[in-house]
Image (cartoon, rainbow, N blue to C red):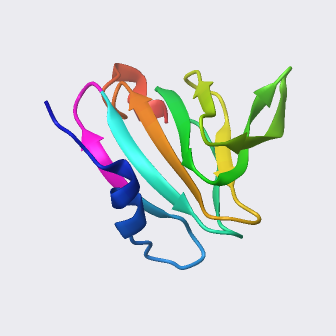
Amino acid sequence: MQLHDVLTIADNAISGNRDKPATAIVHDSADARVIVFRIDPGQAVALHKSTSTVMLSVLRGSGIISGPVAGTVADHEAQVGTVAVYEPGELHGMHSDTATFIVMATITPRPGARPDASHA
């Protein structure tokens, strides 16, 4: 078993660019990758797709998560306890306008683990 203090990892994460969220890999295996994002006001993770299933869990603060609803990408207010699940190929992203937003992304299987990963 491995235990991780995700909030401390997020608090200590470093961004290479102050305009982009800080990120840290919490866990990485062939089965899953877990990444924590610390998104400060004005920062965003741009809309993108994955060949894997992506689950976003809000751990601290509130912000906006984006994803498809009825064929159109829409923004949704997310707060502690919100979990959003994106199927492979669905656009997803997140941003914060007012407060620091801590989000944990669980990506299964790990990116690159599927044979069709070259299409990502």
> Is 30 a magenta residue?
yes
Specify whether 28 is left or right of 19. Answer: left
The residue drawn where x is 86% and y is 20% is 70
The residue drawn where x is 42% and y is 32% is 107
The percent coordinates of residue 91 (x first, y second) are 67, 35
The residue drawn where x is 59% and y is 25% is 85
- In terms of depth relative to the viewer, which is nearer, 5 or 43? 5
Taking the image as drawn, is residue 90 in sight?
yes
Specify whether 3 is left or right of 120. Answer: left
> Is 117 a magenta residue?
no
Counting labels gives 0
- Residues in magenta? 24-31
- In terms of depth relative to the viewer, which is nearer, 7 or 66? 7
The percent coordinates of residue 21 (x first, y second) are 54, 65
The N terminus is located in which quarter? top left
The residue drawn where x is 47% and y is 40% is 105
Query: Magenta segment, principal secondary structure?
Result: strand
29 to 114, vertically: above or below: below
The percent coordinates of residue 116 (x first, y second) are 41, 23
Specify whether 33 is left or right of 65. Answer: left
Taking the image as drawn, is residue 51 in sight?
no
The percent coordinates of residue 114 (x first, y second) are 35, 22
25 to 31, vertically: above or below: below
Question: Residue lying farthest bottom?
Answer: 18
106 to 36, vertically: above or below: above
8 to 19, vertically: above or below: above
